[in-house]
Image: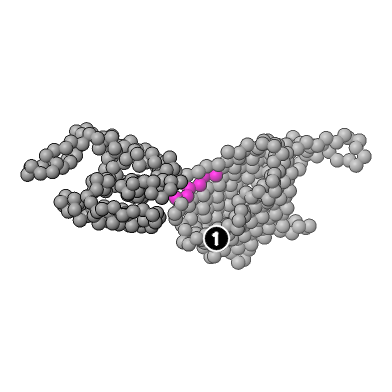
């Protein structure tokens, strides 16, 4: 701190008249720097106060000296390991000034006027009054490129606040049972393709923007269905975006959007009529709320709450399916406002080879309720081979066509697969 204080004083007084620098100013810094030296080396003998050339670096424009930088990188700038009195007083003063110059280079590199090589090209001219010579600086008549500042090449790298990541997987299950198996049953094969992609923006200050896009498409064969050789058993298209503005630490004012549908028709066993298809149904949700994002050690989660500010829209492309999804006959859509709560646990490593991802969503307009909870466990057997377990629970009392005598409005889905996964 003392060194930095002296540096500030030295630069402040660098504009003093040359005559004053040759007398009182130099003697003042002789005393001050000698005091710094003596505080660390008690056996240093006092020297006669005199005008000293070692201060020339302080009273001229700041220069990047190769010797100063070299000593600092060599680790001998403080002359460690030398006994008291081994250095002459001028050398000790010079060592202190070296430290001041290093502080200047580190904290205010923009103040450095030239390099030592440029200093050697300066021209010494006599004063008009015939007195002591003075230094004038000769600036080269050149046009510097845009990436050159102060005579030194520089490279300016614009921060990239965008990040992307993704995962693609192809998983299979196979089961063969002979026709005379004592317990009965039937052979089947399943295949599941998964694609997840994330685009995130974070300016490391206030603004964040996250978009998650996922596609899941799975097929299963079954001999019980004589009309279809295979059917879809998993089908989802979903995109979810969240824009956040940081209010305080871990708390954002956020706007959230979710769009969800499927890609292919799904048929009941031995039925020619599908019960769902692309845009049948289609769900859209828009809301504004608060997003709480705490971190406890390595565990992270996000709790998003939008009280009375969530807009929900449901669309069914085929009129004969409207009643199944709670839409009045003759119409293709319905909309309402309500409260939305979303709890998201980003992928967490709960064991060495086990990753867990969870998402729970609740929406109500106070006359109906919707809830779903998705859990996925990925077990990495090696770099590419992964076993996965998916658990999906869903509740929707607005769709009478989905009511079941055993589960009521609850819907349960479980899926276990083994396959190849690649992440980036």
Q: Which quarter of the rendering shows the C terminus?
A: top right
Question: Which residue sits furthest left?
Answer: 129
Q: Mainly helix, strand or loop, the magenta region?
A: strand
**Which residue has dot 1 on it?**
292
Left/right of residue 104 with respect to residue 203 in the rendered view: left
The quadrant in which residue 385 appears is: top right
The relative height of residue 119 versus residue 335 in the rendered view (above or below) is above
Q: Is residue 202 magenta?
A: yes
Q: Is residue 173 magenta?
A: no
In this orientation, does residue 337 appear?
no
Left/right of residue 382 with respect to residue 111 in the rendered view: right
Range of magenta residues: 198-203
x 83%, y 38%: residue: 186
In this orientation, does residue 123 appear?
yes
x 29%, y 38%: residue: 115
Q: Nearer the viewer, residue 13 or 404?
A: 13
Q: Secondary structure at mark 1?
A: strand
Left/right of residue 288 with respect to residue 260 in the rendered view: left
């Amino acid at each position: 701190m003392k060194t930095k204080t002296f540096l500030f004083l030295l630069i402040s007084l660098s504009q003093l008249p040359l005559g004053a620098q040759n007398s009182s100013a130099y003697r003042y810094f002789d005393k001050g720097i000698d005091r710094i030296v003596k505080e660390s080396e008690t056996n240093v003998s006092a020297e006669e106060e005199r005008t000293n050339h070692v201060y020339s670096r302080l009273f001229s424009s700041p220069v990047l000296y190769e010797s100063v930088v070299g000593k600092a990188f060599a680790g001998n700038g403080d002359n460690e390991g030398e006994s008291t009195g081994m250095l002459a007083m001028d050398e000790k003063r010079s060592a202190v000034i070296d430290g001041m110059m290093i502080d200047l280079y580190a904290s205010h590199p923009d103040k450095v006027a030239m390099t030592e090589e440029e200093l050697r090209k300066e021209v010494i001219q006599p004063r008009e009054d015939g007195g002591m010579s003075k230094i004038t600086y000769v600036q080269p008549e050149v046009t510097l490129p845009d990436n050159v500042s102060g005579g030194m090449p520089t490279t300016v790298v614009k921060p990239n606040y965008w990040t992307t990541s993704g995962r693609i997987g192809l998983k299979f299950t196979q089961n063969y049972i002979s026709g005379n198996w004592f317990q009965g049953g039937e052979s089947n094969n399943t295949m599941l393709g998964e694609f997840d992609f994330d685009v995130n923006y974070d300016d490391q200050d206030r603004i964040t923007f996250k978009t998650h896009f996922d596609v899941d498409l799975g097929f299963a064969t079954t001999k019980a269905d004589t009309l279809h050789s295979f059917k879809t058993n998993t089908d989802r298209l979903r995109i979810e975006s969240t824009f956040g503005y940081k209010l305080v630490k871990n708390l954002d004012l956020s706007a959230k959007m979710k769009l969800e549908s499927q890609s292919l028709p799904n048929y009941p066993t031995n039925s020619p009529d599908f019960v769902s298809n692309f845009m049948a149904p289609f769900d859209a949700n828009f809301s504004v709320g608060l997003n709480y994002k705490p971190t406890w050690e390595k565990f992270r989660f996000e709790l998003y709450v939008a009280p009375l500010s969530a807009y929900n829209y449901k669309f069914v492309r085929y009129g004969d399916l409207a009643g199944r999804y709670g839409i009045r006959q003759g119409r293709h859509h319905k909309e309402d406002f309500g409260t939305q709560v979303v709890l998201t646990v980003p992928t967490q490593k709960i064991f060495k080879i086990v990753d867990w991802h969870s998402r729970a969503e609740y929406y109500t307009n106070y006359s109906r309720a919707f809830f779903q909870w998705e859990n996925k466990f990925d077990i990495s057997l090696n770099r590419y081979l992964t076993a996965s377990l998916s658990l999906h629970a869903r509740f929707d009392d607005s769709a009478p066509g989905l009511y079941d005598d055993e589960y009521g409005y609850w819907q349960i889905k479980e899926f276990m697969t083994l396959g190849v996964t690649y992440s980036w």
